Each structure stands twice: as C-alpha cells, then as structure tokens.
Image: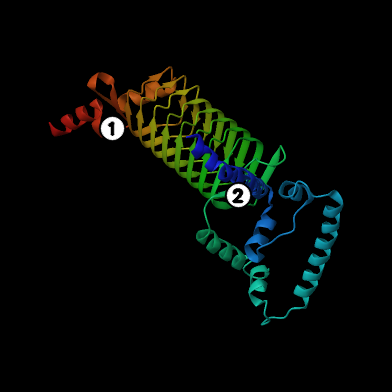
Amino acid sequence: MEHLVDKMKPDVQRLERDVLPVIEQMEQAEERWQRLRGLLSEGQRRMMELRGYTPLMEVQRSVLFPDASPSGCSESNEITEHVLEQNIIELAKMEEGGPAEHNLDLFRQDGGQKRAFRQERRRKKRQADTGGLAPDTEEGRSIPRTVALEPFAFDTRLGGVVLEGIYLSPTAFYRELASPEVLTIRALSPIAFYATILSPMVAFARILSPEVFKAQILTPQVLDAFVLSPEAFMAEVLSPLAAEGRVLSPRTLFVQILGPTIGALHIGSPDTHGVLVLSPHILSPRIYSEERYLIEILSPHFLGGEHEHNMEEDTHEHLGGSVRFVGWPEHSPLGEQNSDKHGG
C-alpha cells in the first residue's frame, strides 16, 4: 500500500500544483461574471446583444478585474468616451443603403419608435439561454431602487429585494427562487406566467398590475395590498396570508391549498370559480365581494362579518359541513325549494 501511495505521489503533487489552481481561477472568474451580469444596465445589455461588447463603469470593472489599478480605469474611461464619440460621428455620416443599414433600422426613431429593435431583441431572447437574472434582482444594486419602463421575460430573480418600486414594466415567464420581498410596490406592471417559490413577501403593494397564470409555493404574504389588480388562473400551495387588503381586485379560476387567511379585508373584490383545501378564513370580512362557484374543503370561515350572512342562502354543505359549495344558487336548499314549488 505504501508503495502504491509513493508511486501516486508525483501525480497528486502535479494535480495540486497545476490543475487545482486553474479550476479555482475558473470558479472565481465565473462568480465575478455572474456578479457583473447583475450590475449591467439595460443599455449595456442591448450593446452586448448587438455588438458582443460594452464599456464598463468603474464599479463594474472592479468586480470583473479586482486587481486593476484606478489609473488604468480612468484611462479606459477616456478611451471609451473617445470611441463612443467617434461612433456617434460615424453613425451621423451614414446614409441609407450603407453597410450598417441593419443597425440603423434598429436605432431609427421614426414611425415605429424602436419597434425593430424590440423585435430583434425578442427574437434573440427566444434563441438565448433563459438563465438570465431579472432586472429587479437586488444583487449589486443600490437601496432603495426603481425599475421603470423596463419590460423583461424569461428571467429569474434570486436573493432578497428591499425598498424597490417597479413601474410600467410588464413581465412574462418570470421566476422568483428563495427571494424574500420587503417594502416593495409594483404599479402598472402586469405579470403573466409567474412562479414564486420560497419567497415570502412583507409590506408590498400591487396597483393596476393584473396577474395571470401565477403559481405560489411556500410563499407567505403579510401586510399586502392589491388595488385594481385582478388575478386569474392561480395556484397557491402552503402560502398563508395575513393582513391583506384588496380593493377592486377580483380573483377567478384559482386553487388555494393549505393557505389559511387571517385578517384580510376585501372591498369590491369577488372570488369566483375556485377551490380551497384546508384554507380557513379568520377575521376576514368581505364588503361587496361575493363568492361564487367556490368549492371549500375543510376551509371554514370564522368571524367574517357581513360575508357570513350574505352567503348562507347560496351555500350547500356535504359530509357534515367538511365540503361546501359556496355561491351555487342552483344547488342551494333554497334553490331546491323554489324548483319544487314551480314543479308543483
């Protein structure tokens, strides 16, 4: 055994001396690149997609090249400004039909207002890898921060978000993984095909931001507000709610499993065509917020105020009250009596 160890010792030493350092350098380079991606602005991302390169700010260069000297950075800034100035002059001199006609189409401002650029970007997005970080990812960003006029798709948000506002930024095919959210607001920013896992949310607001095809798993919500933000085609699993306020924000076609609700106030926000399983509602009054065509399985309502009195006539219970059909007039006892009278 000792002879075998001695024989392998040179190979082990060569591995430790030559191979392992290279692997460590590659891992460090990959980590720096991932951090840099979170720091790129929208303009820099566009330039990367169009040209394959982009000038970096001093903070970004310090992430990618931590050992670079400040003097080199300032010199690079001067060179970058000079190159950009020359590029602008060259673009101004170009005429239609020249070799750069494709780039001119992307930047032309008449009629379509950047329409060609957006179409090109969407095409590249579909062809590219979908593992990019979303613009609202907090890594490397200042707090508080604002995301405005920045639609995005096929992105993932990792890590927590604090004190953030998202405005006029629609989102599609979006994932949140282990990404808690505290003190945020989303306005005029609809979401479609949205999944959030292990991402609790505290003190957030949604204003004029409808959500469609949404899945929430292990995502509790506390102190949230929905204003004019309807939701449809939803699935919530192990996602309890506490101190929620909804104003003119109806929900339809939803499933709620193991998601108890405590202290929720609904005003003009009806729930229709849904299934609730082991999701009781406690201290959750509803004002002008009817429940229609719901199936509640082991999901009672306690101390719901006006809601309890209004729904009694359209509620039909089965299995000793463990299963209830809420808002089904044709299946309620009153509906059956009326049908018997008309039949007689």
State the mark number for residue 139: none
Rendered position, 328 above or below 23: above
Q: Secondary structure at mark 1?
A: helix
Residue denoted by label 1: 329
Residue at 43%, 24% in the rendered image: 260
Give the alpha-carbon distance from disc 1 to disc 2, as whole Å: 41 Å
Residue farthest to the left? Answer: 344
Compared to residue 16, the image places residue 51 above or below, namely: below
Q: Return the residue found at the far front.
A: 3
- Residue type of the residue flagged with mark 2: Ser
Residue that label 2 marks: 169
Mark 1 or 2, which is nearer the eye? 2
Q: Which is more N-terminal, label 2 or label 1?
A: 2
Kindly state the secondary structure of the residue where label 2 is placed.
loop
Quarter of the figure that contains the C terminus: top left
CB within 8 Å, label 1 to label 2:
no
Q: Camera-side residue: 234 or 325?
A: 234
- Could you tell me residue 336's position as x and y percent? 20, 29
Q: Residue 162, position in %: x, y?
A: 65, 34
Amino acid type, callout 1: Pro
Spot occupied by residue 73 in the image (x, y as percentages of width and height): 82, 53
Q: Nearer the viewer, residue 247 or 136?
A: 136
